[in-house]
Image: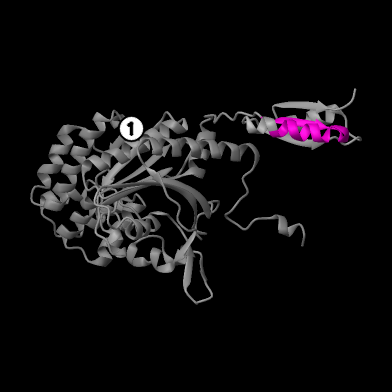
Amino acid sequence: MQRELLHTPEGVRDIYHEEYEKKLILQDRLNGLLRRYGYHPIQTPTFEFFDIFGREIGTTPSRDLYKFFDKEGNTLVLRPDLTPSIARCVTKYFDEEDLPVRLCYMGNTFINNSRYQGRLKETTQLGAELIGDPSVDADAEIISMVVACLKAAGLKEFQISVGHAGFFRGLTEAAGLTAEQEEELRNLLSNKNFFGVEEFVETLPLEENLRRLFQMPGRLYASAAEWQEMKECAAAYPQILDALEELELLLALLKAYDVSRYVSFEPGMISSYHYYTGIIFSGYTYGSGEPIVKGGRYDRLLSYFGRDAAALGFAFVIDQLMAALARQQIAIPVTYETLLLVYQAAYRTEAIRKARRMREHGRHVELLLWDAARTKEDYAAYAKKHHIAEVEFMAEG
């Protein structure tokens, strides 16, 4: 029984020693960068009322939530992501603010998903939300921050794939798809089954330009000629055309930020989070089979909490980012500065005072009473094992 108590449940793990030192350093780097862009930190509860993440808001399915009850019988959930929590906070605390609100956050999220073996059920998210700015300029700022964060993490090769929720929504509305047909198409695209998409489209009575637009999801576009071709096909479909023109302007702004080389455009991209209304993006790099960052615009999400406001943001999955850095052999340097001060009982008061003075000047000091059964070599080995930079002895002789 005692040995069983040492194990963690499936999907969670302990992080300690050098790995956790590196995680803290990485988080500090990214937090510092977000602060330089003018984003202010906010912390939300680890658990919230069930309705904050309910089906209407379009986040994690109920079956994947960790649910429990409080003493009053309310259904509570461990948060599966932080964006709905931030939306609730903004409505509650910034309701009178008529200029953009910039917030950044970090916290653990919990998804009870057993469909993917080996995937963690508790992960750390770090991200930012920009509330109250509907412009493409805000879209460009957010994506430029994502690029800056990935570079600050140490990555050199990565790609941000950008789409627009209005493109897919415009396709389904123009084609008059039923809810069942839309879900079938969404599943095909989510699974990258583009042959299945072609077969699905063949069953629909579509005019030629709309049929051509249905061929665009899953394809990447870069040249001006390709953009013009898409816009010509979308001329009779305002929602699709608006999405393409927003992406075209976004590309121009990303060139001004000098980050366009890290960005590719996939207009028909979709997300499992149904609250997105504008741009959608995911970031990828070598060594990670899943996106290390996701984000987008969600201009209608705050209305569920009683406020109409434009909004967009992103979240890094820190655990996946660290795994990618490790697989690419990108080091996160850890500086060890601790002094191990080993003292004999006769020097107890002197050692405590010395450690106090050094700590007041910013030095890391670990105090340890000398065990007569141990040698200096024992303490040197201890220091090496625990990455202690220096050992000092206060003893006679």
Foreground pick, 163 / 20: 20
Expressed as whole percent of the image width and height from the top left, the position of residue 124 reads 50, 48
Give the residue drawn at x 35%, y 53%.
190
Q: Would residue 107 be seen by someone viewing this image from the given angle? A: yes
Secondary element at tag 1: helix
In terms of image quadrants, where is residue 81? bottom left
Whether residue 387 appears in this view of the structure is no
| Magenta portion: prevailing SS class | helix
Q: In this figure, which residue is indicated by the disc labeled 1?
A: 262
Q: Quadrant of the N terminus?
A: bottom right
**Magenta segment includes 214:** no
Judge whether 338 appears above or below 307 on screen.
above
Q: What's the magenta region? A: 338-356
Give the residue at x 82% y 35%.
348
Q: Amino acid at mark 1?
A: Tyr
Query: Counting other residues with Cα less than 10 Å from the Cα at mark 1, is it few (<14), some (14-19), or many (20 or more)?
Result: some
